Amino acid sequence: MDRPVSVEHYKAGMLLSGVGDAIGYRNQLWEYNQSGPAIHQELQELGGLKNICAELPDWPVSDDTVLHLATAEALATGKEGEELLHEVAFGYVKAMKDMEGRKPGPSSILGVSQLRPGIEGGFRIPYNPEGTGCGAAMRSMCIGLRYPHPEQLSSLVAVAVETGRMTHPHPTGFLGAVASALFTAYAVQRRPIMTWGLGLLEEACPVAKKFIQSTGYAVTETEKDWDYFTEKWKWYLNLRALSSGTGPVNWPDQYGPAERDEVYKSFSLSGWAGRSGHDAPMIALDSLLGAGSNWEELMGRAGFHGGDSDSTAVIACCCWGLLYGKDGVPECNYRNLEYRDRLESTAQKLYALSCR
């Protein structure tokens, strides 16, 4: 993991995020299965992860990858500022035409329907107190690939906040975008994983709050709803003994599929693990901490649980690919993945931009 980041790591991050999505989704069957043990049992009946060829028609990517690609392809143009935000908004509107069988969430559908790209301020939508879901978090990993350097934190946060609240203007929703983008940037920086959560709370969230105040958009509502995200993350770091960013990680004595289902529910806003902006990246981080360089273990934790399994996997697998490349990943998992070419070519462009 101490190898410097290459274009191959970028390609692995984008590609494996799509793999985690397609396999965690299993054409709607696993995203909506509320039992991790049942999913693990079905996985064994399929011959295990090494036997899954994630390809059409049985293993399409979900809305997560379609919207992640929309974000990534807009970033890959090299545009900045409001020009970039309109480009992202155009991408989201276009992506919504590619949602047959992919199950976009209600906030994503509503938010995109309210975007007016190309019109002044048309990348912003009205505040939505229900916009707490993971739809912003699951499509923002590529922002950390575009702005991976520590001195680019303010750009990373600004783009994550603005693109996140195109559909999820509630801080529990759009701060999930900040978390996903930050974690991939940390992966590129080779920053120790045990420090990532603390960095989110102490480095990125204060920058996000200042940015919100500077834009003057929905400031009062946002500040009123701010604390849930940060308090839940403080709770998580305390639970895992990571409040100082050093560890060692405090794990439960038993932490198999059944135990993880219960623990992940305790992370959640309303009992659906990974469904919200705060806990999709939280489960992803939990999985990365527990899996190390073991791909099968990562998928077991991030992709095969009784919650929003594709959205937690899409974040975890992007970070994992940036850290470890494709080492140990069965080729059939990614060889014929839907949109593989787009994922890899966009990764190459983002890598080139990151090296400037």
Image: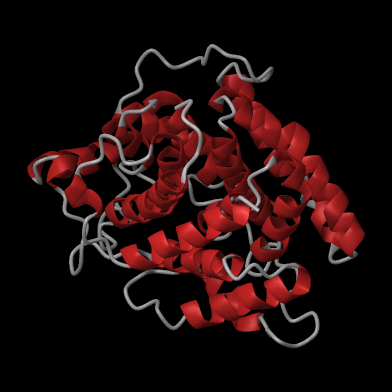
Q: Closest to the observer: 126 or 192?
A: 192
Camera sees residue 241: yes
Q: How is the image coloured?
A: secondary structure
Q: Residue furthest front?
A: 356
Residue drawn at 37 percent across, 54 percent down: 15
Residue furthest to the bottom in view is 119
Q: Nearer the viewer, residue 310 or 204?
A: 204
Residue 210 in the image: state x and y as whole percent: 87, 49
x, y percent for residue 110: 59, 76
61 over 185 or under it: above or below: below
Q: Is residue 135 shown left or right of residue 128? A: left
Q: Is 163 placed above or below 200 here?
A: below
86 vs 333: above or below: below
Q: Is residue 133 visible?
A: no
What is the x, y in percent for residue 295?
Answer: 30, 35
Would you identify the image quadrant in which residue 240 lies?
A: top right
Image quarter (top left, top right, bottom left or bottom right) of the N terminus: top left
**Residue plotted at (50% across, 39% down):** 5
Q: Nearer the viewer, residue 38 or 233?
A: 233
Residue 125, percent from left and from top: 72, 75
Q: Residue at x 71, y 39 (%)?
A: 150
Question: 134 or 148: which is nearer to us?
Answer: 148
Side of 96 where 167 appears, left or right:
right
The quarter holding residue 86 reads bottom right
How many marks the image carries: the answer is 0
